Image (cartoon, coloured by chain):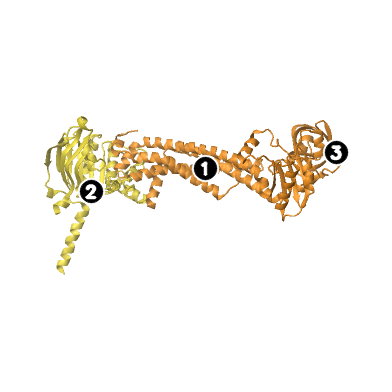
Chain colours: A yellow, B orange
Amino acid sequence: MAEENDTIIKLESLTKRYGYGDAASFALKDFDLTVKRGEFIMIMGPSGCGKTTLLNIIGLLDTATSGTYLLNNEPVSRISARRQARLRSKKIGFIFQNFNLIPDLPIIENVSLPLVYSGYHKTRRLIRASEILDRFNLKEKEYYMPFQLSGGQQQRAAIARAIVSGPEIILADEPTGNLDSHSSALVMEELKRIHSEGNTIIMVTHNPNLTQYATRVINMLDGAIDTDIKTVKDSDLPVPVHQRAKKKTKKKTKRKRGKK
Amino acid sequence: MALLLKTHYELAKSSLKQNKTRSFLTCFGIAIGVASIILILSLMGSISTLISSQVSQIGSDLIVVRPSTNKNAVDSVVDELTSSTQYLKSNLTMKDAQLIEKLDNVSSVAPLAVSINSLKGDDLVPSATVVGTNPNFLKIQNLTLKSGTFLKENSKTNTAVIGAALANDLYGTDEPIGKSLTLLGERFIIVGVLSEIDDPINFNNLDLDESLFVSASTLNEIDNSLQIQQINIRATNTDGIQDTVNLIRETLVAAKSGDTNFSVLYGEEITHPAGTLFSIISGILAIVAGISLVVGGIGVMNIMLVSVAERTHEIGVRKAVGASFNNIFLQFLFEALILTVLGGILGMIFGYSIAFLISLITPFSPFISWEIVLITFLTSLTIGVVFGLYPALKAANKNPISSLKFWG
């Protein structure tokens, strides 16, 4: 039962097909994957092997042609479009290779964007975004427009946006692809810190040097898993911050009851 | 829900601000349409109140006989619009006026024979309105003289009474008593000047300030083609005025051996012929203004489509971070609504300003009612929904993945 709870994403024979008949091509073919809470997965593989499609499906931006996707043990096909949008704003954070900040909005409003759709009041949105930006050392750049920031700063702002609503899953599609090595290292340190707080991260990358940050490295080939290596035992995965607190309080209450 | 709507409103407002010129121009398109509708409605309203105030002024004991055809209203309006003068087919005669005068409950009768002629006083007025009538006219119209006397029965010389404005045109003064003028080769002496009335729109279809009044019989002698266009009658008693009207009708039908091409009107009816003409014209004007509003609406739709296309990437980002179909749909619909409602308010201000300017040089007074304001507001809201719907649907239906790949 406990193990069931630890599973956050479960994909079973997931298939994504483009085109029909002779023209059909498969981005994903009978793809199986189980992701536990707190994993930091790096997905590698040649271009066109279905990495981005996989991220899009996990992130509820795309739907599979066939197969099942269980998100928190709930089949996604049974979740309404409206609730999927809600889940995207609250439970899932996206980080893109090209940052995808809205060029016409100042950084702080870009960062607070997911909060708009999870029903926060404007003042609270901006306060929260400001707090997050402070954490990323971007507080003094709050009201800069995206083009006024360097690539590394933009990507850190984008990561701030991804985690602003406290999601459980962070999906990163080559977040360091457009950055120099120094900025890359900074961005990876941020991701590492987010992971250490117990978040699940699935990241697509081409850079084999980054696998040192991962707890699990998956190599994909032609829409299927080629190799799947776990570098950290499941039991050593970080526990989410809020769950840590709960566990402690549970123990305390138990102790108190025992004394009585 | 309220919070959500407020958020959509904020989002829409901020994206409109990013494109100030474009938003303003689009607004302006709507404003022009709304302004023209406001202008027309306001002038129409002011004319209606003008006419109905006249009806109450002239009193309930007034009866008017006019030539009419048995055509329906639209035909007669078309006739009125296309014929060179409004009084071509009169079958009324001086004899009719004399017959009516003898009937019960009739206190006084004044025929109106109108012709357009050139007048020569100190100056030449090439086309002035000359009214042939009788001494009763002054009393029936409740007119007052500024100076001199009105026309007298059986006066031996050709006398004329002049409207104040025409006096100024002919002599450069409003005290021309004793001066002479030439009408169709005959000399007339001015014996009186009417006080200024400043009431060009009235049931006589005459601007009395711009008219010359002579005896109907004298005018008939020098102008063979003269016809009586209207007979104004005052009843002694307001009670039983309907009987008097019927009596006049029967008498005239009998005198004309069954010819019914005339109408006997009293009360509200008197203002009606002008009323139908007027409402048809203003109806057509309102349709034209409505078309300009639709054109403005198409402008809004056009701009919204451009904006949706330009912001495809933004829509993709918003969807990726959790915007639902409804979120995007409402954001773009609100943009269209803000544009049209703002345009509506702007148009209302324009429209009333122009109406006010017009009122400075004409007898119209701008007519403002909450109905007009409400109608304008609802119209611009409707335009916003109708023309914002398609772009908003288009935006909301965008696929997030392909939108994210789109860099405008």
Q: Amino acid at mark 1?
A: Leu
Residue B229 seen in render: yes
Looking at the figure, which quarter contains the C terminus of chain B? top left
Chain name for mark 3: B
Query: Which numbered mark, 2 or 1, is in the foreground of this view?
Result: 1
Q: Amino acid at mark 2?
A: Glu
**Whether marks 1 and 3 lie on the same chain:** yes
Residue B360 on image: x %, y %: 65, 42
Residue B78, by quadrant, is top right
Locate residue B220 relative to residue A49 in the image: left or right: right
User: In the rendered image, which residue does mark 2 sit on?
Assistant: A168
Q: Amino acid at mark 3?
A: Gly
Mark 3 and mark 2 residues within 8 Å of each other at the beta carbon: no
Crowding near the residue tagged with mark 3, few <14, some 14–19, many ≥20 C-alpha atoms within 10 Å: some
Q: Residue placed at 20% from the left, 30% from the top? A: A22
Depth check, front residue: A223 or B63? B63
Outermost residue, bottom direction? A260
Residue B151, by quadrant, is top right
Q: Secondary structure at mark 3?
A: loop
Residue B270 on image: x %, y %: 68, 46
User: In the rendered image, which residue does mark 3 sit on?
Assistant: B178
Chain name for mark 1: B
Query: Which numbered mark, 1 or 3, is in the foreground of this view?
Result: 3
Q: Residue placed at 26% from the left, 44% from the top? A: A93
